[in-house]
Amino acid sequence: MSHSIAVFPGSFDPLTIGHVSIVQRALPLFSKVVVGMGVNTTKKSMFAPEQRLAWIKGVFANEPRIEVVSFEGLTVDLCKRLNAQFILRGLRNGTDHDYERTIALMNRQLAGIETVFLPAEAHHAHISSTIVRELIANKADVAALVPMDISRTL
């Protein structure tokens, strides 16, 4: 394995078991995976950036090849700063594929950075942060959809 670094960007509001699965399944492919928690100051999030960052760091605390950072701006700029050659994305369905493919092509044109897609596991394909937020807002139990560290603090 060469010294390859992948950035897995997202808002992770909140981190789901689907996100965790993508990162864990990508580990054999890269020497390091950086979970880049994007902070968009114009976007309203359910959970504060500090809370999301703490959750992500907690979930991956026992894996030295996973680094967790927060960032603002373009993912390709984060990649350049970290010397990462790849962007990692999970795909749940065809809609995700069409959307992510367009961004991947733009990122390659802008910065020469390739995107690696991993399909969601079948039993995670229905899980999204948007749906989890909706469930939380309506006081539903999301324990099966988020890592245990997170479900304990909700």
Image (tube, rainbow, N blue to C red):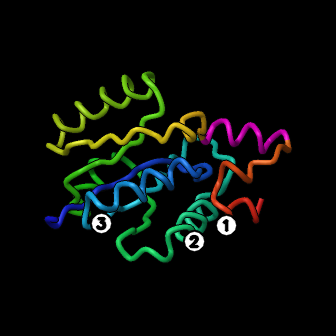
**x and y percentages locating residue 133 in the rendered image:** 70, 42
Mark 1 vs 3, N-terminal side:
3
**x and y percentages locating residue 68 in the rendered image:** 44, 66
- Is residue 31 shown above or below 120? below
- Is residue 96 shown above or below 57? above
- The numbered mark at residue 96 is none
Q: Nearer the viewer, residue 78 or 142?
A: 142
- Is residue 21 shown above or below 130? below
Q: Is residue 16 left or right of residue 98?
A: right
- Is residue 74 shown above or below 104? below
Judged from this view, the residue extending furthest toward the right is: 139
Mark 2 vs 3, N-terminal side:
3
**x and y percentages locating residue 122 in the rendered image:** 52, 37
- The numbered mark at residue 149 is 1
**Image-quadrant location for residue 138:** top right
Q: Is residue 1 left or right of residue 141?
A: left
Residue at horizontal 51%, vertical 55%? 20
- The numbered mark at residue 32 is 3
Residue at horizontal 18%, vertical 38%? 108
Give amino acid for label 1: Asp
> Which element is circle 1 on?
helix
* On-image quarter of the N terminus: bottom left
Q: Are marks 1 and 2 in contact (CB under 8 Å)?
A: yes
Dot 3 alpha-carbon crowd within 10 angstroms: few under 14, some 14 to 19, many 20 or more: many
- The numbered mark at residue 58 is 2
**Image-quadrant location for residue 43:** top right
Q: Nearer the viewer, residue 99 or 41?
A: 99
Give amino acid for label 3: Lys
Give the residues in magenta. 129-138
Residue at horizontal 64%, vertical 46%? 45
